[in-house]
């Protein structure tokens, strides 16, 4: 795996060095004093930069308000250590509020055994991380398994099943949202509508990630999922305009719905007009997702049909 960051500006190199240190120190603090064997031996085995900053196609335009996110895979020694709330949340907050770090940091955490199972199964996402990622930190003696591609037939079947499942989730959430919007402003129907629209958007982005790479992060943060999905197909950017700045507000309000529309309803106030606009944007996203996914499924089906049999 590569370890050279020389293609990045010095500012980003310094930020990544700082982030790596914060992750290691935060993890050490979070696991200190553990008595269970897996916690006493808790280790961060690898920290890997993947995505646009690893590939070199990142965007760095602060004057336009657009900066690519840092995407990091942290590999740990035990599955129990992947719990974000227990071991990573405080460090994520420290990074988020650090004035020396000028862009969003997206963190996914898996144990080494899980990553190796994914590599054995030929999961595209993890293959891409290993092939294109850049090692920021590594403990010797904990190698990834050799890359194994999915057979074309298995890839086609798996992607089709993922798409079927996610399409059902999208449809259910959108139906619920429309029903809640129709109830007007009574009781907590507006908040229910916002939450269901959030779930439809989440399922749509997950569909793209699963069909394109056979992996989606365990996250309900639709801003994170949006960035990952748009990295797969830039046509998805059109669903949520970033300019002018005011155009970002509807998506940010929808992002808040996962928590606030359920648990902070007094502070989460949303009008019927706002919900109708969000519904229209969600339906626009779903149409784009359908195009992206079905194009990918068609390619996979052709590859499966043309592959040698037996």
Image (cartoon, rainbow, N blue to C red):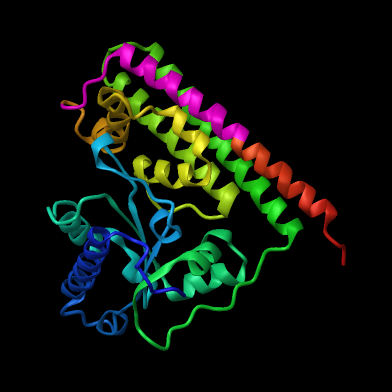
- Quadrant location of the C terminus in the rendered image: bottom right
Residue in view at x 50 percent, y 24 percent: 284
Name the outermost residue toward the bottom.
141
In the rendered structure, the answer to whether residue 295 lies left or right of residue 264 reads: right
Asked where in the image residue 135 lies, by quadrant, the reply is bottom left
The answer to whether residue 22 is left or right of residue 298 is: left
Residue 139, by quadrant, is: bottom left
Along the viewing direction, whichever of 162 and 306 lies nearer the viewer: 306
Residue 86: in magenta span: no
**Residue depicted at 31% across the width and 16% down the height:** 274
Position in image of residue 110 (x %, y %): 40, 67
Q: Height in image: 287 above or below 107?
A: above
Q: Is residue 171 visible?
A: no
173 relative to 306 in the view: left or right: left
Instruction: Give left or right: position of 43 versus 294.
Output: left
- Where residue 244 sits: x, y (%)? 29, 24
Asked whether residue 284 is in view, the answer is yes
Q: Nearer the viewer, residue 229 or 283?
A: 229
| Place of residue 295 in the rendered image (x, y in percent of width and height, measured from the top left) | 67, 39
* Residue in view at x 69 percent, y 56 percent: 155
Numbered label tally: 0
Principal secondary structure, stretch drawn in magenta? helix
- In the image shown, does 281 or 264 lie closer to the viewer? 281
Where residue 279 appears, as percent x and y from the top left, is 42, 20
Residue situated furthest left in the rendering:
99
Q: Which residues are magenta?
A: 267-291
28 up-or-down from 258: above or below: below
Residue at 34% from the left image edge and 66% from the top image edge:
82
């Amino acid at each position: 795996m590569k370890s050279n960051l020389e293609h990045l500006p010095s500012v980003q190199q310094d930020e990544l060095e700082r982030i790596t240190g914060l992750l290691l120190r935060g993890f050490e603090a979070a696991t200190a004093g553990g008595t269970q064997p897996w916690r006493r031996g808790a280790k961060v085995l690898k920290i890997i930069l993947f995505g646009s900053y690893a590939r070199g196609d990142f965007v760095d335009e602060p004057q336009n308000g657009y900066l690519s996110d840092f995407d990091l895979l942290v590999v740990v020694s035990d599955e129990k250590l992947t719990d974000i709330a227990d071991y990573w949340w405080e460090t994520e907050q420290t990074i988020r509020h650090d004035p020396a770090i000028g862009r969003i940091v997206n963190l996914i955490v898996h144990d080494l055994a899980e990553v190796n199972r994914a590599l054995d199964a030929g999961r595209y996402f993890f293959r891409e991380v290993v092939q294109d990622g850049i090692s920021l930190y590594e403990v010797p003696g904990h190698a990834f398994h050799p890359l194994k591609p999915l057979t074309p037939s298995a890839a086609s079947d798996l992607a089709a099943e993922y798409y079927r499942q996610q399409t059902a989730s999208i449809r259910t959430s959108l139906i619920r949202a429309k029903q809640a919007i129709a109830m007007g402003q009574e009781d907590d129907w507006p908040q229910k509508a916002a939450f269901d629209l959030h779930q439809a958007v989440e399922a749509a982005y997950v569909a793209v990630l699963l069909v394109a790479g056979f992996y989606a992060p365990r996250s309900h943060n639709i801003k994170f999922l949006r960035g990952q999905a748009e990295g797969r197909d830039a046509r998805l950017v059109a669903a949520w305009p970033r300019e002018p700045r005011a155009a970002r507000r509807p998506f940010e309000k929808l992002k808040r719905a996962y928590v606030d529309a359920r648990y902070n309803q007094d502070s989460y106030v949303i009008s019927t007009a706002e919900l109708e606009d969000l519904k229209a944007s969600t339906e626009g996203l779903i149409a784009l997702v359908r195009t992206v996914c079905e194009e990918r499924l068609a390619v996979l089906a052709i590859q499966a049909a043309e592959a040698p049999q037996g």
